[in-house]
Image (spheres, grey):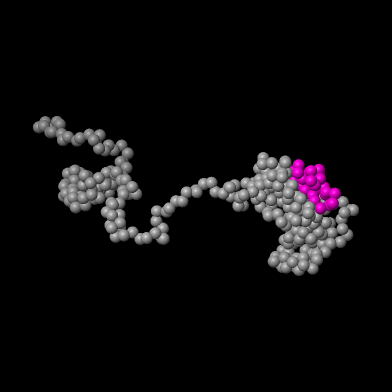
């Protein structure tokens, strides 16, 4: 962004004040904001000051600052930041803002700037000889689909050619700018396709609407005879749902009979009884005594036979 400064002192007016109509409007605008937030009205008041004098003067900045109880530097920051505020005198009948962003540039914005240089002045922001016209190059103005375009005051003029822009400039120079219709300058409605719609031109009749006659009883019966489709039903291939197997899911009665038969059969482990548990035994979980041998490693004891001689 280029540096934006106030105009030279010799063109600055000494004082500024809203006229009666704008004074009433300014007071009503300030009252729209809650207590303590009146400074939020700085942009609307600066815009109204620009509309009254044609550009934002130093006196207007100081007037707005005093009215909103703001430091001068804060209002100056707002005025110099936004390019919508003109800080120097512009054309009294038209100030033309030519969009120079990529979409407009690809569609002929350079030719529009050449028209402005030829009919107004070679340099932007410079006034013509009568002081009625001026121009500048700006960034995107939000109508890329209708490129190239210009904005004059608050109105946009789109789908321009160099010849059409010359006609618009001549009309504003003659004081007849209000006769030019804003928007697209070709045969299109807003941003619709040029020449009218080019797609979906065939009439498509809906299958059923509330305006169509109700179907007859024969048609309803014929539609009811069609079996429903299984496309939306889940596909379950789990063995539990196989109808060939007798499971609780497929044959509850047979599965219950199988369960009762299994309960009547003796258990395979019922023949072997565990050793009784005595307090302090290994079966109870007590550790063996030191040096004791347990289990199959313990040697078997035999009785000694006595003889008549007393020898064993």
Quadrant occupied by the C terminus: top left
Q: Quadrant of residue 245?
A: top left
Question: Number of labelled discs?
Answer: 0
- Residue 4 visible in the shown view: no
Q: Was residue 130 drawn as part of the magenta stretch in this picture?
A: yes
Q: Quadrant of residue 155?
A: bottom right
234 relative to 15 in the view: left or right:
left
Q: Was residue 135 drawn as part of the magenta stretch in this picture?
A: yes
Front residue of 261/27: it is 27
223 relative to 270 in the view: left or right:
right
- Residue 173 visible in the shown view: yes
Q: Position of residue 51 (x, y in %)?
A: 77, 59
Front residue of 305/55: it is 55
Most extreme residue toward the right is 10
What residue sits 58% from the left and 50% below the top?
192
Q: In the rendered view, would you say 275 is above or below 36?
A: above
Q: Magenta stretch?
A: 113-139
Q: Position of residue 169 (x, y in %)?
A: 75, 50
Front residue of 151/259: it is 151
Front residue of 42/97: it is 97
Q: Position of residue 304 (x, y in %)?
A: 15, 34
What residue sits 17% from the left and 44% below the top?
271
Quadrant occupied by the N terminus: top right
What residue sits 58% from the left and 47% below the top?
195
Q: Position of residue 78 (x, y in %)?
A: 76, 55
Q: In the rendered view, would you say 222 is above or below 306?
A: below
Q: Quadrant of residue 118?
A: top right
């Amino acid at each position: 962004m280029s540096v934006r400064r106030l105009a030279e002192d010799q063109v600055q007016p000494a004082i500024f004040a809203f006229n009666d109509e704008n004074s009433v409007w300014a007071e009503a605008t300030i009252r729209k904001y809650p207590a303590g937030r009146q400074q939020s009205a700085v942009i609307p008041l600066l815009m109204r000051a620009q509309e009254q004098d044609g550009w934002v003067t130093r006196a207007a900045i100081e007037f707005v600052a005093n009215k909103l109880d703001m430091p001068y530097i804060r209002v100056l920051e707002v005025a110099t930041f936004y390019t919508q505020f003109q800080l120097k005198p512009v054309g009294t009948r038209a100030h033309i803002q030519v969009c120079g962003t990529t979409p407009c540039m690809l569609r002929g914005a350079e030719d529009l700037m050449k028209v402005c240089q030829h009919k107004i002045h070679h340099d932007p922001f410079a006034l013509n000889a009568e002081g009625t016209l001026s121009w500048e190059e700006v960034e995107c103005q939000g109508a890329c689909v209708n490129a190239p375009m210009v904005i004059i005051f608050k109105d946009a003029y789109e789908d321009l050619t160099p010849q059409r822009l010359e006609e618009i400039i001549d009309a504003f120079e003659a004081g007849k700018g209000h006769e030019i219709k804003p928007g697209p300058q070709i045969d299109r409605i807003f941003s619709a396709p040029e020449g009218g719609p080019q797609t979906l031109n065939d009439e498509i009749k809906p299958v059923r609407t509330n305006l169509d006659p109700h179907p007859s009883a024969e048609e309803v019966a014929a539609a009811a005879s069609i079996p429903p489709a299984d496309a939306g039903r889940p596909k379950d291939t789990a063995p539990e749902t196989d109808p060939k197997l007798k499971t609780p899911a497929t044959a509850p009665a047979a599965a219950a009979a199988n369960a009762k038969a299994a309960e009547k059969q003796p258990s395979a482990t019922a023949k072997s009884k565990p050793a009784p548990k005595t307090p302090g035994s290994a079966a109870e979980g007590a550790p063996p005594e030191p040096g004791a041998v347990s289990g199959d490693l313990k040697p078997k004891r035999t009785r000694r036979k006595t003889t008549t001689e007393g020898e064993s």
